[in-house]
Amino acid sequence: MAWINKMKRWQQFHDLDKELKLELESLLSDEKFLEDAFYKDLEFGTGGMRGVIGVGTNRMNIYTVRKASAGLATYIQSFGKEEKARGVVIAYDSRFKSREFAMEAAKTLATKGIQTYVFDELRPTPELSFAVRLLNAFSGIVITASHNPSEYNGFKVYGSDGGQFPPLAADVLISMVNEIEDELLIEVKDDMSLREKGLIQIIGTEVDQAYIEKLKSISENPDLANQSDIQIVFTPLHGTGYAPLKNGLKALNYRHVHVVSEQAKPDPNFSTVKSPNPEEHAAFELAIRKGMEVQADLLIATDPDADRLGIAVKNHEGEYVVLTGNQTGALLLHYLLTQKQQKGTLPTNGVMLKTIVTSELGRVIASSYDIRTEDVLTGFKFIAEKIKEFEQSGEYSFLFGYEESYGYLIKDFARDKDAIQAALLATEACAYYKLNGMSLYEALMSIFARYGYYQEGQRFLTLKGKEGAEQIEKLLASFRDHPLEMLGEKSIIQSEDYFTSKRLTKGNDWEEIHLPKSNVIKYFLEDGAWICIRPSGTEPKVKFYFSVQSDSLDSSRQSLQMIENQFIDEIQLRLKNISK
């Protein structure tokens, strides 16, 4: 078996890292665990790689980080000396091994003569995106696993525009990473000698200050902070968001900010939450307790690398409700367009960008302001790619980009989702509506009343390891071999397969989908609802997205629950057939 040969190569390597060597020795009796650790190389995909920390070629460790970094070095070298001199900016979050992995990446690149800039302490992902542009670097790396469990870490790669590598560039980079045969033999010099040569430079406050200055431009109404007394509760969920958001709110003069003290400090164990994910309502438990204590108008949570934002607001019963990513996106978009229209700053060629699994409510809102909406595949790198395209062509002016998974971008000085930007705009919107006698919850209800009661949901199946990956592939194949035609009593009137790039109607008429290929299938029902099936690119999951719309909130909620349950029954049936 090939995995045994890989394992023995590591076992026999004379200079194996001591910690990894001890871990390998302790696992020699656990064949199933070893197979999963060595049966493949940790996949380097279009956004980089992410995995469990530990020993093995299918794990995050100093050797897999060196391999990814060496592949990036080869890619940069192919562009010549000037690009080597422009170099790479590296940031890292609060996870286990993040700083160590950041320095391994820096040493690998610098050993090959590539200039590197490493942040002195942990920083959020959007600030890394900003720093790449600020320093005119060729590329960027951030060591993070976003909101994954504590045993994970990752390696994300950015291009010179501050966005994650688009598919064509990523494919070239992936091939260069995969060409490296032995990750154990990659040469890495010590960091002190590389610092003395100037190949590794430490950066910090100068970038922070420039980022804060740009954050000030988010405000549509800078005087609102002085006119409003809104109370804000903020939790960084043990991650990188504490300093940048506190400083951003201070720069805009919001004074009543209450931080959840138990979650303020970085903690790689994320010890106060089951999952450090603002999409999970349980992550707001301590923030809600603090909110009730100070009677907060707005609760804010950022994930560990501060690219995702969750908010909670009080409903009519005085209870805090955690909004979905689609709902927060609708609120931010509506506020932004309303203010720009009132001030006469709304461009005639404005465009809003969203992903194919994001609510159609955003499109309806944008259309009411004569703003175009463009759909992209799931992943903020595709939004960044469109921003760059429109920046170069001048065809459209970017106004807002978002995805249902709590990612938003207001100003394109960063080219990845930015929870700090979004939190500042959410705070301002809250202040605006309060001065006008409304809560953010009431503002959302008014949007529903005007545009329709859209409700979205998401379910997922976690299928870990080699067997799980095979099951996910077979599940998607089953929908291609035996397409869904009915769900309950409702007909499927259209399907979209982003792998074959075909949109098929019930009459078997088809048209081409002009987006990159992706292993995603979407079904549209006769009542306007839709369902989407998508394997996660970063976790061992297959995700199911649902959207409905009707003339009342209760009706939409009932429809959503019904469609979710019916589809999960379909999934269970297909999984049972697959396993036979």
Image (tube, rainbow, N blue to C red):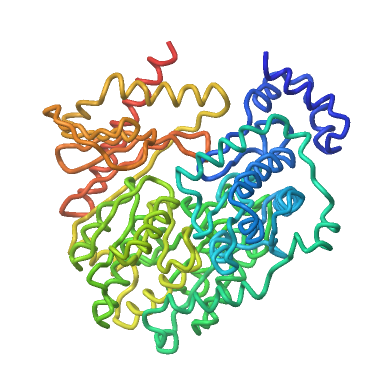
- Residue at image coords 32%, 72%: 336
Q: Quadrant of residue 149?
A: top right
Tell me if I can see residue 409 in this picture: yes
Q: Is residue 460 above or below residue 212?
A: above
View extreme (right): residue: 14
Q: Position of residue 170 (x, y in %)?
A: 51, 43
- Residue at image coords 48%, 39%: 537
Q: Quadrant of the N terminus?
A: top right
Total residue callouts = 0
Q: Quadrant of residue 44?
A: top right
View extreme (top): residue: 580
Position of residue 456 in the picture relative to residue 161 (left or right): left
Q: Quadrant of the C terminus?
A: top left
Q: Position of residue 216 (x, y in %)?
A: 48, 79
Position of residue 322 in the picture relative to residue 240 (left or right): left
Viewer-nearest residue: 256 or 365: 365
Q: Is residue 232 above or below residue 92?
A: below
Q: Is residue 426 above or below residue 579?
A: below
